[in-house]
Image (tube, rainbow, N blue to C red):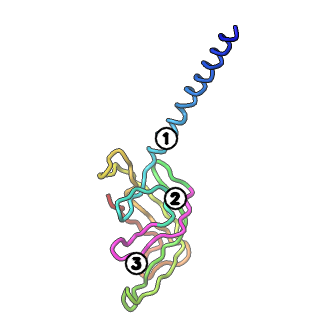
Amino acid sequence: MAITLGAAASLAGLMATASAAPPAAQAVKQQAARPVIVDCFWHSEVRPGDFILACGDGNSRLVSLHWSQWLSNSAVATGFNVVNDCKPYCAAGKFHSYAVVVRLDQPQPWKKRPHLQHYTRMSLVYTNGRPEGFERTVSYPLWD
């Protein structure tokens, strides 16, 4: 009788472990299904704290990003766009910070890793001032 109860308890423990595995596997699958953003160095990132916009010279970057959502079709953050005014020329210019809302969207398969979706467009909405010559909202295609 004790052996039967012990076997039943062991079987119940295994069943509980087995039934717990699918939700964990499902969570990993859902996480993998969320798009990434590709940076200047062709690394995939999720919810980065900063992001270089001007890969060639670093004269525009996003910093202090706080993500309120990162979904399968879009992501939204607030932060700052730090931009060099390049006056009188970029090496002698000064950097200025502008508050922005960042939106990522239009996910597509990433050419480097087709099993991953990556956002292909970024829109910035300047909420309090903006760089000279910029519209209040600007959109950029993101590299593949």
Residue count near mark 3 (Cα–Cα under 10 Å), binned few <14, some 14–19, many ≥20: some
Residues at marks 3 and 1, CA–CA distance in whole angstroms:
37 Å
Residue at 48% x, 76% y: name it. Answer: 82
Residue at 46% x, 80% y: name it. Answer: 131
Query: Could you tell whether 144 is left or right of 98 in the image?
Result: left
Q: Determine whether the residue tagged by mark 2 lies in a helix, strand or loop.
A: strand
Most extreme residue toward the right, as rendered?
2
| Magenta-drawn segment | 51-68
**Residue with the mark numbered 2:** 76
Residue count near mark 1 (Cα–Cα under 10 Å), binned few <14, some 14–19, many ≥20: few
* Label 3 vs 1, first from the N-terminus: 1
Name the spot of residue 65 as percent of width and height, x first.
53, 65
**Residue with the mark numbered 3:** 59
Name the spot of residue 43 as percent of width and height, x first.
38, 58
> Does residue 126 belong to the magenta stretch?
no
Most extreme residue toward the left, as rendered?
111
Contact (Cβ within 8 Å) of mark 3 with mark 2: no
Quadrant of res 12: top right
Residue count near mark 2 (Cα–Cα under 10 Å), binned few <14, some 14–19, many ≥20: some
